Amino acid sequence: MKTMNIAVACHNASGVPDMPVFSVTVSDEDYAYGIHYDKAKALAADAGYERPFVCFDDTEQNAIVSAARSLDLVPRLVVVDMTDGAVHSVRCDAGGVCVICYDESDTDPSSDSVMERPIGYEGETVDCWAQVQTADIDPHLKIARDWLEE
């Protein structure tokens, strides 16, 4: 048995397009027959969502990411100005993203910004100074992004 997250494109009760995510558990055989989709569709209907239901399992969710990138809903380029070792600004080309800037060499215990945070490799905790900031959208970065992708 395996548990998967299935994104279901549909409409909510108000008729507005939506894409809720449901967790389903299926055997390998059920997966081969598409039962994971049937379970996700049933959960969507039970939650009050309306048809048509189009399901995306873990292996197909790159289509969602690709569409979001094409629509400039998610950032592909983030620029952090750290002149003189301090964070001055965080900008991104599209969408919005929360950025954690941290410094493992600055661990002064008297600072309120210093603590153990789960930002290391695979979520390991790191004792560090950290500043959390939301990136501001800068439409000019799209030019830089397009230049980098050439």
Image (cartoon, rainbow, N blue to C red):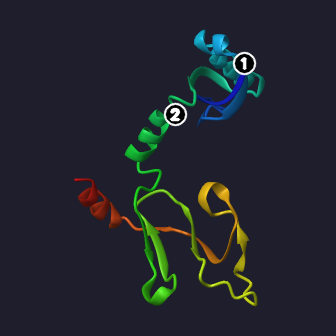
> Residue shown at 69%/88% (left/top)?
108
Number of numbered discs overlaid on the protein picture? 2
> Residue shown at 46%/50% (left/top)?
73
Is 101 left or right of 116, judged from the image as shown?
A: left
- Where is residue 64? Give x, y as percent: 49, 37
> Residue shown at 41%/46% (left/top)?
69
Quadrant placement of the N terminus: top right
Inspect the image, locate mark 1, and give the three-letter code of the amino acid beneath it. Ala
Residue 8 position (above or below residue 148): above
Disc assigned to residue 61: 2
Which image quadrant for residue 111?
bottom right
Is residue 112 visible from the viewing direction of this image? yes
Which image quadrant for residue 141?
bottom left
Disc assigned to residue 133: none
Residue 147 position (above or below residue 135): above
Closer to the chain start, of discs 2 and 1, is 1
Q: Mark 1 points at which residue?
A: 42
Q: Which of 108 and 80 is in front in this view?
A: 108
> Residue shown at 70%/65% (left/top)?
125
- Where is residue 138? Give x, y as percent: 40, 68
Q: Residues within 10 Å of mark 2 (few under 14, many from 20)?
A: some
Q: Which of 11 and 81 is in front in this view?
A: 81
Is 53 left or right of 144, judged from the image as shown?
A: right
Inspect the image, locate mark 2, and give the three-letter code of the amino acid beneath it. Gln
- Where is residue 35? Give x, y as percent: 66, 13
Contact (Cβ within 8 Å) of mark 2 with mark 1:
no
Whole-angstrom CA distance, mark 2 to mark 1, is 20 Å
- Where is residue 65? Give x, y as percent: 47, 41
